[in-house]
Amino acid sequence: MTTGWPSAPVVYEIDTWPWMAGVAQRLGHPVTLADVPDEVWDETLPPGIDAVWLMGVWERSPAGLVVARANEELQRSFHEALPGMQRADLAGSPYCVRRYRVDEHLGGPAALATARAALARRGLRLVLDYVPNHVAPDHPAVVEEPSWFIQGDEADESKEPVAWFRAAGRILAHGRDPYFPPWPDVAQLNAFSPGLREATAQALADIAGQCDGLRCDMAMLLTNDVFARTWGAHAGPPPSEEFWPSVIARLRRSRPDVVLIAEAYWDMEWTLQQQGFDFCYDKRLYDRLAHDSAAEVRGHLAAGRDYQDHLIRFIENHDEPRAASALPGGRDRAAAVAIATLPGATLWHEGEFEGRRTHLPVFLGRFPDEPVDADLHAFYHRLLAVVAGMRRGEWTMLDSDGWPDNPTHADVIAWAWHDEVPHHVVAINLSDHPSQARIAMPWPALAGRSCRLLDLLDGRTFDRDGDSLVSDGLYVDLPPWGQHLFAVTT
């Protein structure tokens, strides 16, 4: 990239509103982003990260809050996640944006600027959200710019009343993902509207002036093909130009350095990369690490570097279940080592390292009390420290084989990073049973030398004969979900 960012950045997501509630509780008084003490920043931000995503800083909608209070299904999920929830704990959805102005609860724009400066002093960049598909029903544009929205008529409203609402004398669509029911607290924008495209480019430029990276929510919904299939005649004819190339080209004229991250699903990562995004969610890898076998993960990682270098890998974020609960028994650690050592960007989530198990709905402004898993916390901090700066040079998937009476080698995945000495080898057992394998080493120059392998995760060292490594491979015997991260020296 030419943005000044690292080629494989590590991003740490903070759920801003509940995190700030925790800071206020710790300090004993209300705080804004401008009031966060240095020691709190230093304790919150783990080593080895490059950027902080402050999720949910924009002005939340009073109208959306009314909808959330009245929705019985949402209320059940709130009380399940936060027993004893109080009225003040319901902050409203950060993806029901009334205005792209930092919420006064967090201190407004000046407080965000102070927080950004605090991050910059630590060598960290700031990432903020943009929600291109919809806005709050009380967003000023609902009244002032009706052509920016999907509009219907009384027949639409009668046929599917939950999908439409009335505002300023018009019938407007609620926002939606075509595979799920409409979102009752937001108004659907029309991606085919020229006025909306111009406004989106301006909004992105305004936000980019306050940060170093933009995470674009549900970015695939705005592609011409998806939008036309979702909204049909309500959207009008598709323009000749795609939505994202149109608005990104305008943004790049004023902010060529800002990094763009697309939340992407349905195997549309490559499409969005080609349309201008620097990184796209690798949800497919998440699903395979969480649910599938080593063979599926290995097949996924066979893609070319030109694709993989522009993915952002994760095993948890605010939309997914907590890794400690969704990937039990050590699977979370195996998956963590994988995403930390693969090409592309890495996304970690506040609370992931501490072993939080409650998936907090984004509407809520306070975390439940949960014990810290000290051992897991130490594991993550060591992992981030040892992989910092490791992902350089050539990356190669490594073959593993075994023995006719022991098929467990098929559960081992392995890869190597080739750089100046030391080289690095990663081996992971993606199964709930012990596995043994011989991993083919990619360095013929090891022949005739004595080699030392230092496991950066636990500090153990193994001395091996280079001739044996080249001819027979590296033998590993891994416990369930076990991992090695070797630095190889001669």
Image (spheres, rainbow, N blue to C red):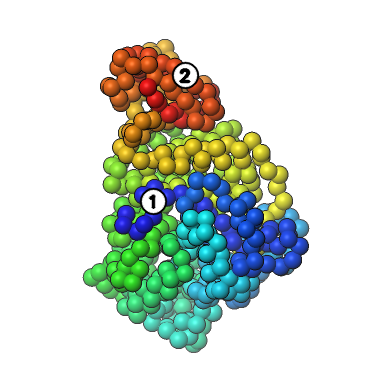
Relative to 35, 490 lies left or right: left
Q: Quadrant of the N terminus?
A: bottom left
Q: Is residue 162 above or below residue 167?
A: above
Q: Secondary structure at mark 2?
A: strand
- Which residue position holds label 2? 462
User: Is any atom of residue 301 visible in this view?
Assistant: yes
Q: Is residue 77 above or below residue 383?
A: below
Q: Nearer the viewer, residue 46 or 401?
A: 46
- Residue 184 in picture, x, y percent from top left: 54, 69
For disc 1, the neighbor class at 10 Å (few under 14, some 14 to 19, many from 20) is few
Q: Is residue 67 above or below residue 432?
A: below
Q: Quarter-wise, where is residue 466 in the image? A: top left
- Residue 189 in picture, x, y percent from top left: 42, 73
Write the residue at 52% across / 31% down. Answer: 457
Write the residue at 65% across / 55% down. Answer: 39
- Residue 282 in picture, x, y percent from top left: 41, 48
Q: Amino acid at mark 2?
A: Phe
Which badge, 2 or 1, is on the more N-terminal residue? 1
Q: Quarter-wise, where is residue 409 in the image? A: top left
User: Is any atom of residue 190 visible in this view?
Assistant: no
- Residue 484 in picture, x, y percent from top left: 47, 28
Q: Is residue 158 above or below residue 347?
A: below
Write the residue at 40% across / 26% down. Answer: 488
Q: Amino acid at mark 1?
A: Pro
In this view, the residue farthest toward the left is 240
Relative to 373, 332 lies left or right: left
Q: Quadrant of the C terminus?
A: top left
For disc 2, the neighbor class at 10 Å (few under 14, some 14 to 19, many from 20) is few
The numbered mark at residue 6 is 1
Q: Secondary structure at mark 1?
A: loop
**Alpha carbon of mark 2 to alpha carbon of mark 1: how far?**
32 Å
Write the residue at 42% across / 50% down. Answer: 9
